[in-house]
Image: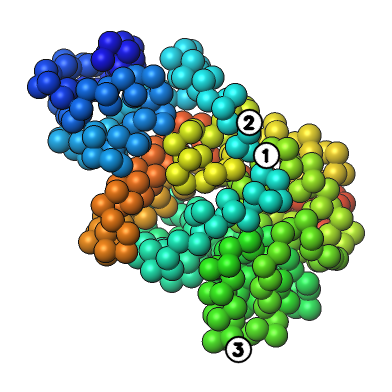
Amino acid sequence: MWLLDRLLTRAITRGALELTTADGKVRRYGDAASPPVRIRLTDSATAGRIGRNPALATGEAFMDGRLIVESGDIMDLLELVTSNLRWDRGNDLRVSLWNQQRIAAKWDELNARARSKRNVAHHYDLSDKLYDLFLDPERQYSCAYFKEGNQGPESSLEQAQIDKLDHIAKKLCLKPGMRVLDIGCGWGGMARHIHRVSGAEVLGVTLSEEQLKYARAKARELGIDGKVRYELMDYRDVQGPFDRIVSVGMFEHVGRPNYGTFFDKLASLLTDDGVALLHTIGRVGGAGATDPWTAKYIFPGGYTPAYSELAKHIERAWLWPKDIEVLRLHYAWTLEHWLKRCRERKADIVALYDERFYRMWEFYLAGAAVAFRNDDHVVWQIQLGRTRDGVPVTREYLYR
């Protein structure tokens, strides 16, 4: 217990946490005047596990029911902790905790071909019924775009996801007759939208068999399967050329050792006047590491890149960055919508899986939301091409 006590004494200085241990003792941390988030540990071993490896053991204890939030909920607990460990100049405790993870994360990021499909299946080949419970009708499983940003999560998720598709389509400067590649096409919503607004022919590639089945069925249902095709294919095996390339929410699974390969492939697939749009989660604090709980339970092989880690590979591939947009709180709002919907459908999720899975999913969504509120996470939208031309020289065309 002394390790956890020492950690919480250092970590919780704003707000308050009240911890009841398995033997009934109560400890309080932080500001004496603040109403506390109250948690209880059901066994003595859990305190030691969290003290030794908080980033992994906290999530596991919550999943197993060994850490119970008795006042507030898991979002309140994670908000309290991460607001104290906020990405900020001079937060030495945050730096020391994250340094533990960097070495352990290296192996998980290799993501060679043999692992890529298995890693994707781990998350995306879950039951379709699960995703229908909390996603919008187009199954957009990536950051939405809240045009009325100050309204935040009060805006409609459905409208924000449509606005995201529109925003990306505008950045691609689409024309009828173009050939478009969607790398990591998910359930196919982006590809269908591109064809709908431009008439372009689209090839979507994915490594998820479940997503592929859904996307193909949807294209047949809409009568566009001759114009919008989906293939089970690694991006490294695609043959071009393409006038436009888009990739939304896939790059986080590429892995740092493969960044050079990805951008070289992008450059080789684009026509001379082609345009690519990369939409990916990013970090503003430089190179980091995927936390061990997320790597183990949610996204094995996943990694969130700093822009500095992308820039050198973009340069070496002789690609022009034409526009870079940073979406800061948009993903926090998106995740809060998803979390709210999952909580409303808890009984359905438990019926699909079990209580432990539900708590895992709740921890994942809440943890991701606070990462965009308090950690160094953002979303990059990077517009690229082989030449300096091909798109207007200002952003005015996006808002006409």
Is any part of residue 400 visible from this angle? no
Q: Do the residues labelled 1 and 3 touch (CB within 8 Å)?
A: no
Nearest to the eye among marks 2 and 3: give it. 2
Residue at the left extreme of this rendering = 24
Is any part of residue 101 visible from this angle? yes
Which residue appears at 24% of the width and 33% of the height?
67
Q: Is mark 1 on a helix, strand or loop?
A: loop
Residue that label 1 marks: 110
Residue type marked 3: Gly
The label shown at residue 106 is 2
Residue type marked 1: Leu
Percent position of residue 219, x then y: 59, 81
The answer to whether residue 12 is left or right of residue 139 is left
Real-space Cα separation, disc 2 to disc 3, in angstroms = 45 Å
Badge 2 local density, few (<14 within 10 Å), some, or many (20+)? some
Residue that label 3 marks: 223
Residue type marked 2: Lys
Residue nearer the viewer, 16 or 169? 16
